Image (tube, grey):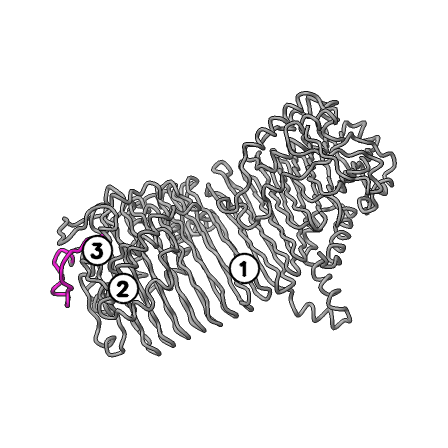
Amino acid sequence: MAVKEKALNTLSLAAERAAELLEVSESAVKRLSQKLGEPDWLLAQRLEAFGRFQTLPAPSPETDEDWRRTKAFDAGFFSQPIPISELVEVRRAEALHPELLASELSDGGASGLLLEQHLVGTHRFLTKELERSGVILTDISTAAREYPQLVRKYVAPTASDDSKFEALCRALFTSGVFIYVPAGVKVSLPIWMGLYADADASLVLPRSIVVAEPGSEVTVFEEHLSPNGVGATAASALHEVFVGEDARVTVVSLRYWGQTVRAFASHRFHVQRGGRLTSLVASLGGAVTKAFVRADLLGPGAESQMFGLLFGRAKQHFDHTTIQDHFAPHTTSNLLYRAALRDEARSVYAGLIHVRPEAVRADAYQANRNLILSKEARADSLPKLEIETDDVRCTHGATVGPVDEEQTFYLMSRGLPRTEAERMIVEGFFEDVMASAREEAVQNSIRRRLLKAMQETNRE
Amino acid sequence: MKTTNALESIGTEYRYGFRDPENYVYKSKKGLSHEIVEEISWMKGEPEWMRRFRLKALDIFLSKPLPWWAARLDLLQEIDFSHIYYYIRPTDKQGASWDEVPEYIKNTFDRLGIPEAERKFLAGVTAQYESEVVYHSIREDLERQGVIFLDMDSGLREYPELVKQYFGTVIPPGDNKFAALNSAVWSGGSFIWVPPGVRVEIPLQAYFRINAENMGQFERTLIIAEPGSFVHYIEGCTAPVYSTNSLHSAVVELIAKKGAHIRYTTIQNWSKNVYNLVTKRAVAHEDAVVEWVDGNLGSKLTMKYPGVYLVGPGARGEVLSIAFAGRDQTQDAGAKMVHAAPHTTSTVTSKSISKDGGRTIYRGGVWVKKGAEGVRSNVRCDALLLDPYSRSDTYPTMEINEQNVSIGHEATVSRVGEEQLFYMMSRGISEPEATAMIVNGFFEPFTKELPMEYAVELNRLIQLEMEGSVG
């Protein structure tokens, strides 16, 4: 077995949880599945996904349009060790890193939470009321053991359009969250999932599955964090959301990786008849972030609202690709991605509205707005339309521009220093995407992290 | 939707699909080889540098793959380059006046409906019939102004130094596979030089035709506008219908020096079997203006993205284009704006209509290079779909490397509005008429930029197609 021990004991927290480091290999898949006590069928799925991972090519910036502008994901990405361990239950949330808890959600603001810190363990909470109504909030491995019938419906070993990164995550996810909301159940307060990836020099593979049955309602807030200096150096995340008929789901995904992390993320939304999805993807931190966000509108009347919030500084590089795919008649999609870029940061945005021949009366909108805060910052925008039927309304727009000097001047004439004026302008720039998070506690969390990102200095 | 009935016949039929019996003085062997390229150069009595240029371009063509990003790579792959005549010369002698132009060629123009008055009005008619220019005349006042307006072959013979200085500088053979092909086998096209400060008040025009089965047409146009000058060049194309595919691959290079203004208008109506793979690019120096007015009707597959490299401060680039795709047609067209100097501006307006399963694509790019401060660019694409089987795609790219810029892109796709139709029909206008009016209104920003006789021709073309379906 390819086990690689690393000197983790230098970290004071390591004693609490003996993490084992595995290399990406088939034996690692078996070892991980065994350690997490998974049923055989889940291991079989992981192995199938691993087979897929091995046959899929690594992205080629030369021939693959999706990767032409983001070149950092080479073979080295897959050669970093993956930290695994048994699921250690942490009784008191306070045992976790304060950064992970920096949210008013930890103080009774959430109806459920599942927090994980690599070197410490996981902490889980769900209100009795929700538990009674059949809501499930647990890790995927446990869910697979306890609710095999249900979980098998949603944990797919592959998807036809998986990339190497998604296949790897399906094969070797270590942090898996499964949220299930039964039909008609309305979850009033948000469910919060947090991951703090502090195992050093590692590849972290988080996966989440959110299932909202017909007529249910839920808001989910996911956070992926890692410290600067130590902690994860690579991440490949897979987020899947299944919105049932007439269900209402809001998913806020925030990632704030440490400065050296190369992060891949794939968000897949499946919306059935009459279902409504709202998504906010907030990308902060990291060295390079490549994200695919895809909403499939599968049934008549399905609707998706997709928002993006990106703040880049230093030499950070963000590359977000969104797809609004209309499969059915009378479907509606709306999208707004905003990026503010400072220093030498760069954002690449590519968005596609695809209206298939069956999707008559589709209504689709897509907008990308870029705010350039310094001379060396850079924004690329590639908004695309593919329309295969006539009875539609599709519009997209993209803009790139600097801070309005008049606004800055006005604020400065009121006695605000330039940096403060700029902060206010950036916050104002993000206000409408921030509003999509709906829950105030979630908005406050994002605002706090955004502020922190803006205050970070440029030391490498 | 019932309204689509009114437009059913648009683009389904090619009305100018007659053909003349072939009657050529020289026809090169089919296919492409170093020998053929040498032969073309030898037949034309070209200087050594051009012979080498062609041969080098041929090597590039042979080594370059087809563009991998092409939306219809499947169609490109169907082109059999070994089955094409790369050079045909209809007559040995240039016509010095209209009287000397062979009768059958005149007939062709008559049947295309170019009125006598129009011929007189237009400054010089460079009628390219097949691969060689057969008729050429320049009005005396142009000569007095010192304007050079020749076919490209004559330009190379009479002004070898001028041609050598600029030829292939805007679009080098290595730019893309089809530019390389053109560079290897080019024939005909126009060569225009406008002296400093001279304004050519009447549009210069050339008429192109393809008239032999399996024959490619590879014209090459080079326009140089010296500082402070103005010229408007008009290119119009029609081609007869043939049963096998025809390849048209032109290269057009424009150079607008300081404060110069070039407008280049194209109305193209290739028959539905023609591949139209054209590279058009301009360089705009300080305060220069370059406008591409581009109408793409007809052809089986068009790939054309007129570009402007804005290399001098204050330069302006504009593309105004319309595209129409009917059954089995793909119009892959767009614009490229490269802002390489401060305070440069660009505007792109693209209008497209798809019908009967046709596919229109806008593919364009705006690049702002480091140091190009104060750039302003605006791109606007509107697509109209006339039935549920047609398709419209939009693929824009924006790469912005400078802070103080204002870049905007907007695109919409829709169909003919039922409310508009209802309103007009409630005023007693028939449905086909109403639909025709909406289509004409949609294209109007384009038509109004055309010289009168061209606007008339375009309207006539659309009108004819409409009437056919009404009756």
Name the residue that disc number 2 marks.
B190
Q: Answer above or below: position of A416 versus A449.
A: below
Q: Nearer the viewer, residue B18 or B46?
A: B46
Q: Kindly identify which numbered label has been placed on residue B40.
A: 3
Res A118 → quadrant: top right
Res A182 → quadrant: top right
Label 3 marks a residue whose chain is B
Q: Decide: marks 3, 2 in contact (CB < 8 A)?
A: no
The amino acid on which the numbered mark 2 sits, given as a three-letter code, is Ser
Label 2: element kind? strand
Position of residue B306 measured from the top left corner of the image (x, y, whole percent): 40, 58
Label 3, label 2: how many angstroms apart (C-alpha)? 18 Å
Earlier residue among tags 3 and 1: 3
Earlier residue among tags 1 and 2: 2
Q: Nearer the viewer, mark 3 or mark 2?
A: 3
Q: Nearer the viewer, residue A318 or A5?
A: A5
Question: Does the segment drawn in magenta span residue A453?
Answer: no
Q: Nearer the viewer, residue B263 or A34?
A: A34
Res B148 → quadrant: bottom left
The amino acid on which the numbered mark 3 sits, given as a three-letter code, is Ile
Name the residue that disc number 1 marks.
B408
Taking the image as shown, residue B251 lies to the left or right of residue A174, namely left
Q: Nearer the viewer, residue A365 or A32?
A: A32
Magenta-tinted stretch = B87-105
Position of residue B353 measured from the top left corner of the image (x, y, whole percent): 40, 49
Q: Decide: marks 3, 1 in contact (CB < 8 A)?
A: no
Position of residue B46 measured from the top left corner of the image (x, y, whole percent): 22, 62
Question: Looking at the figure, which quarter contains the C terminus of chain A?
Answer: bottom right
For mark 3, does the 10 Å Cα neighbourhood hold few (<14), some (14 to 19), or many (20 or more) residues? many
The amino acid on which the numbered mark 1 sits, given as a three-letter code, is Gly
Q: Answer above or below: position of A118 versus B225.
A: above
Question: Looking at the figure, which quarter contains the N terminus of chain A?
Answer: top right
